[in-house]
């Protein structure tokens, strides 16, 4: 099977891409060979398919929020060709048998490549680490307790030792429950103004301090999920200087929103960790720019309309991200002149691939898997949740004007998303 993509921009040059049997065979000017399928990509830019190391597809158990199929359509629509799915489905993916089952389910139902996380402890809250080695053997690509902080130090220590042994990364959701105090947004003047219970960022940074000491002792590859505070960024910077195998991801919403922008009690602004202060947000941007933070991950967390209605006091934590990440990052960071597109691809393709050892993901090089997104960076459009492929429409970015509409997405040379003609 040969696919020929004609007249596409790559690093600002107009080139053709020849794909043979799912792999990139040639990238050059004016390739003239017969092909089973020819795509005229005039006006589009080709980028390697994006990688998101933090998403929630809600199958099994919570499929009214999202299924593997709808989540994978959302990924493809967002230009993502590989995602890593968190284990907080129902039942939680916390045994080798459940990992095996989940990996099969992912393969059957997904349009994009999926790396599956196994849980660090039983049901995400159990004391004592789960059997990480067995889960790794069954196909778990990494481990996480996302959704819950690991409250018990001994449990985290056991998990770190086992992850080190199995050569898998731990992605930590950092949250000390004793410091949360029923908060629904960041503690600070804005929470007071809105008369909403606040939660302190110390909940994240204190647990991070504990974990970094144990990460050094065990030598585990330790990754911080959705980092959100300036204190955490400072700790990661120091830990890296000390030579620890520490990495971190930041979400687009923590980069582009802060609690001063929450003007009303609006469920679309409730997520975990919460939007922090402007000073925190600026520290996250600085950390990303200087390499302290390695990558961007969406924490795509779909919920039903009902679960995201009413007051922040009662609604669910989390927002969707797969279908807004690239346009938001491109518009705020590249269009504004802060960084070039290639740097964004470091954050959204290369570092995620390296850190999580995602060997099947392609990087737009001859010989690599043809995981490619064709993107229109020229024409602006407005974010409209009604156009999302995800079941979750819960985003605080509705109506924002952005650049970076995905026109087509290919996984192993197969078209998995195609924008409707206007
Ligand atoms: N981020 C969120 O607010 N929610 C996530 C859980 C998580 O990422 O901690 C979810 O599963 O809904
Ligand atoms: Zn989390
Ligand atoms: Zn999450």
Image (cartoon, grey):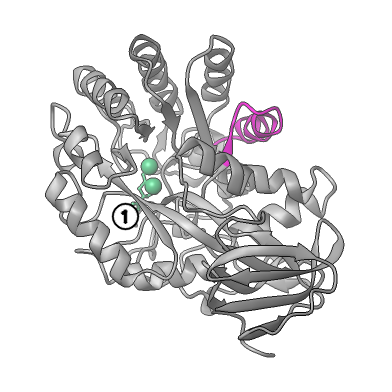
Asked whether the viewer can see residue 250, the reply is no
The quadrant the C terminus occupies is bottom right
Please determine whether, in this image, residue 81 is positioned above or below residue 352: below
Relative to residue 185, is residue 106 drawn left or right?
left
Residue 278 within the segment the image draws in magenta: yes
Position in image of residue 4 (x %, y %) = 69, 77
Residue drawn 69% across the image and 47% down it = 344
**Residue identifier under label 1:** 314
Magenta span: 276-295
Q: Position of residue 343 (x, y in %)?
A: 72, 43
Q: Main secondary structure of the magenta part?
A: helix
Residue 65 position by quadrant = bottom left
Q: Is residue 205 magenta?
A: no
Number of disc labels: 1
Q: Nearer the viewer, residue 329 or 137?
A: 137
Does residue 377 sit above or below 6 in this rendering?
above
Q: Please provide percent x and percent y for residue 267.
A: 44, 58
On-image quarter of the N terminus: bottom right
């Amino acid at each position: 099977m040969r696919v020929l993509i004609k007249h596409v921009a790559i690093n600002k040059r107009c080139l053709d891409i020849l794909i043979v049997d799912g792999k990139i065979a040639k990238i050059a000017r004016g390739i003239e060979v017969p092909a089973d399928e020819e795509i005229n990509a005039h006006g589009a830019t080709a980028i390697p398919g994006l990688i998101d190391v933090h998403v929630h597809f809600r199958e099994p158990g919570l499929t009214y929020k999202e299924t593997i199929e709808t989540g994978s359509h959302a990924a493809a629509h967002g230009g993502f060709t590989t995602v890593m799915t968190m284990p907080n489905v129902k039942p939680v993916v916390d045994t080798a048998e459940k990992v095996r089952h989940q990996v099969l389910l992912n393969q059957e139902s997904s349009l994009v490549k999926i790396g599956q996380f196994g849980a660090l402890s039983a049901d995400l809250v159990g004391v004592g680490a789960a059997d990480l080695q067995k889960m790794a053997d069954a196909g778990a690509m990494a481990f996480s307790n996302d959704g819950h902080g690991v409250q018990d130090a001994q449990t985290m220590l056991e998990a770190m030792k086992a992850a080190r042994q199995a050569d898998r990364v731990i992605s930590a959701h950092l949250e000390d429950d004793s410091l949360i105090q029923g908060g629904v947004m960041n503690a600070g003047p804005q929470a007071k103004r809105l008369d909403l219970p606040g939660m302190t960022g110390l909940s994240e940074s204190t647990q991070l301090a504990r974990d970094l000491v144990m990460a050094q002792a065990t030598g585990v590859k330790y990754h911080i999920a959705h980092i959100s505070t300036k204190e955490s960024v400072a700790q990661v910077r120091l830990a890296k200087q000390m030579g620890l195998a520490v990495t971190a991801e930041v979400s687009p919403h923590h980069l582009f929103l802060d609690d001063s922008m929450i003007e009303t009690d609006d469920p679309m602004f409730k997520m975990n960790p919460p939007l922090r202060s402007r000073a925190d947000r600026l520290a996250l941007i600085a950390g990303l720019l200087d390499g302290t933070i390695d990558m961007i991950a969406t924490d795509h967390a779909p919920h039903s309309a009902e679960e995201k209605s009413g007051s922040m006091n009662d609604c669910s934590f989390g927002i969707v991200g797969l279908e807004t990440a690239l346009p938001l990052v491109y518009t705020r960071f590249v269009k504004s002149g802060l960084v070039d597109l290639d740097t964004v691809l470091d954050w959204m393709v290369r570092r995620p691939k390296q850190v999580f050892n995602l060997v099947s993901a392609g990087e737009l090089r001859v010989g690599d898997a043809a995981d490619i997104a064709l993107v229109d960076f020229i024409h602006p459009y407005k974010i409209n949740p009604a156009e999302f492929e995800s079941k979750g429409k819960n985003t605080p970015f509705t109506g924002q004007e952005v650049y970076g509409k995905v026109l087509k997405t290919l996984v192993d040379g197969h078209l998995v998303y195609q924008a409707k003609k206007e």
